[in-house]
Image (cartoon, helix red, strand yellow):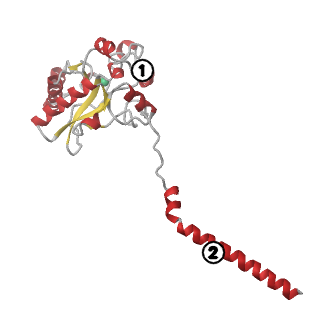
Amino acid sequence: MKQVYSTIFFFIIFFIGCEIAAERDNRSDTTEDVLQEDYLPIAIDSCATEDSIKAKGLINLQEINPDIRVHLRYSGLNNFVNKDLYGCLTNAYVQPETAEMLCAAQQELSALDPNLHLLIWDAARPRSVQWKMWNTLEMPIAQKTRYISNPRNGSIHNYGCAVDLTICEANGKQLDMGTDFDYFGKTANTNVEFILVQNGELNYQQLDNRKLLRQVMRKAGFRTISSEWWHFNAMSRAEAQKRYEIVE
Ligand SMILES: [Zn+2]
């Protein structure tokens, strides 16, 4: 009797073994399907900030002109607040007319020296980011408004009609402009450069580099401001307000 039970037990184990083997064979037949299912590309999360900028009709500069280099300084830690204010936004957006003007400026620069490129540090800036900057910079309001537009009124950056930029070589090396981006002091001013050179705060090479940037930007129709050598407006705030919606 014991032997009969052993035989039955043996057959049960044998059949279970066959079933497992058959199952394994079936799976190996469909390995490709399984792999395809497991390794389907994961959809990249869209960037809400970027989506809302695009929805307002602004243009991604990298898409229309690869000669124009982009490194958004507020998308990263290398900025005056030492915080990443842009998160997923790493592309530079501007209004279509401003984009055309920038392409003209790049063309002019390339004609003068094919090794040189505009390097965009900031372009369309959501007003929510403007508030963060405004609240971070600790200065008397009269002084603060020289460097940051009051978010209540809206900055020309908030309309996508202003850019902060410098010039770099094809290898990425930036021309020396005397100060870094967002240097909040007199050396960044454009209206006292002659005095800065006389005082030794700016040298002739740095002055020439700034002049080159202004030359190509002005020729394309941009306007300068007196407090920051890197900032250029495609139009006045009143014009921008009339024509475009603010990027919130
Ligand atoms: Zn600016």
List x then y, in percent, for residue 126: 40, 25
- Report whether 73 appears left or right of 25: left
Q: Answer few, some or many: residues within 10 Å of disc 1's Cα (few below 14, many 20 plus, some between 14 and 19).
A: some
List x then y, in percent, for residue 149: 36, 17
Q: Answer few, some or many: residues within 10 Å of disc 2's Cα (few below 14, many 20 plus, some between 14 and 19).
A: few
> Image point 40% across, 14% down: which residue?
140
Q: Quadrant of the N terminus?
A: bottom right
What SS does tag 1 mark?
helix
- Report whether 89 appears left or right of 110: right
List x then y, in percent, for residue 205: 14, 33
Which residue, given by chain and number where applicable, does mark 1 sit on? 134
Identify which residue, 41 or 193, lies in the foreground. 41
* Residue 230 visible to an observer of this rendering: no
Q: Amino acid at mark 2?
A: Ala
Identify which residue, 34 or 168, lies in the foreground. 34
Which residue, given by chain and number where applicable, does mark 2 sit on? 21
List x then y, in percent, for residue 179: 26, 30
Q: How many marks?
A: 2
Residue at the limit of the structure toward the left, as seen here:
112
